Amino acid sequence: MAAKTLNLEGAKSASITLVEDAGRGLQAVHDVIVAMHANRRSGTAHTKTRGEVSATGKKPFKQKGTGRARQGGNASPVHRGGGIVFGPRHRDYSKKVNRATRRLAFSKVLTERIAEGDVLTVADFAIADGKTASFVKEVNGLAGDVKRVLIVGNEFTEETKRAARNCQSALLISAHEVNTEQLLHYSKIVVVESALETLAARTAN
């Protein structure tokens, strides 16, 4: 399999909608990436207030005569095992981004990667023997000696998926599922030609 660099003219021929205005789409990319990071946060850190801890309502010592400050119970934050003041509470960090913004961000990043010469196309991508060594050799032959390679196609054979499973430097992804963050993260992007139509549909206005 031989790879060729996808240029802007080739992308237009494949009906991929490009964002050629340098200033357009930058905020959309920022909003999408921030939302993706926020949506991965679990927000499960949770502390109990003095009203929620399990504590007796009995006074720890009598009101007067001890010389100490009066105490009404053991749930106070000043006691060990008492409530926490201003501690983290369970919360939802997720952010919503509308479809038009997501599409604009995807198109903007794809345009930039194509313009930089980081997107390659191949007629097909398959590893017949299902071996990781064969997968690594094929990827290196297509993308060269780079740290991270993203391979985008409509579908892959089970042997190809098995071969890619243990390779940490490359990822197989469907053209329907690839996202803006992945397009930014990987050093080279290899697109199977049959997946160009899917990418074009995802960038269409």
Image (cartoon, rainbow, N blue to C red):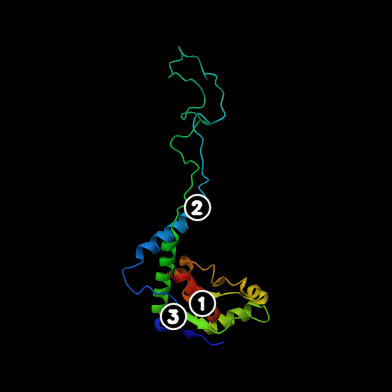
- For the residues marked 2 and 3, what is the alpha-carbon distance in whole angstroms? 35 Å
Please give the name of the residue rendered at 43% of the width and 16% of the height, measured from the top-left corner: 67
Residue topped by disc 2: 41
Foreground residue among 71 and 38: 38
Foreground residue among 74 and 178: 178
- For the residues marked 3 and 1, what is the alpha-carbon distance in whole angstroms? 10 Å
* CA neighbours of label 2 inside 10 A, class few (<14), some (14 to 19), many (20+): few
**Is residue 197 among what the camera can see?**
yes
Does residue 28 appear to the left or right of 91 in the view shown?
Answer: left
Q: Is 91 rendered above or below residue 147?
A: above
Residue topped by disc 1: 197
Does residue 178 appear to the left or right of 25 in the view shown?
Answer: right
Please give the name of the residue rendered at 43% of the width and 37% of the height, measured from the top-left corner: 86
Q: Tag 1's secondary structure?
A: helix
Q: Which amino acid type is marked by label 3? A: Ala
- Name the quarter where the C terminus is drawn: bottom left
Q: Is disc 2 in contact with disc 3, using a CB cutoff of under 8 Å?
A: no
Foreground residue among 128 and 64: 128
Q: Please tell me which of labels 2 and 1 falls first in the chain.
A: 2
Q: Tag 2's secondary structure?
A: loop
Q: Please tell me which of labels 3 and 1 falls first in the chain.
A: 3
- For the residues marked 2 and 1, what is the alpha-carbon distance in whole angstroms? 33 Å
Q: Is 47 rendered above or below residue 139?
A: above
* CA neighbours of label 3 inside 10 A, class few (<14), some (14 to 19), many (20+): some
Q: Which amino acid type is marked by label 1? A: Glu
Horizontal and vertical percent position of residue 177: 54, 67
Residue topped by disc 3: 11
Q: Tag 3's secondary structure?
A: helix
Nearest to the eye among marks 3 and 1: give it.
1
Among all residues in the image, which is located at the extreme front?
A: 205
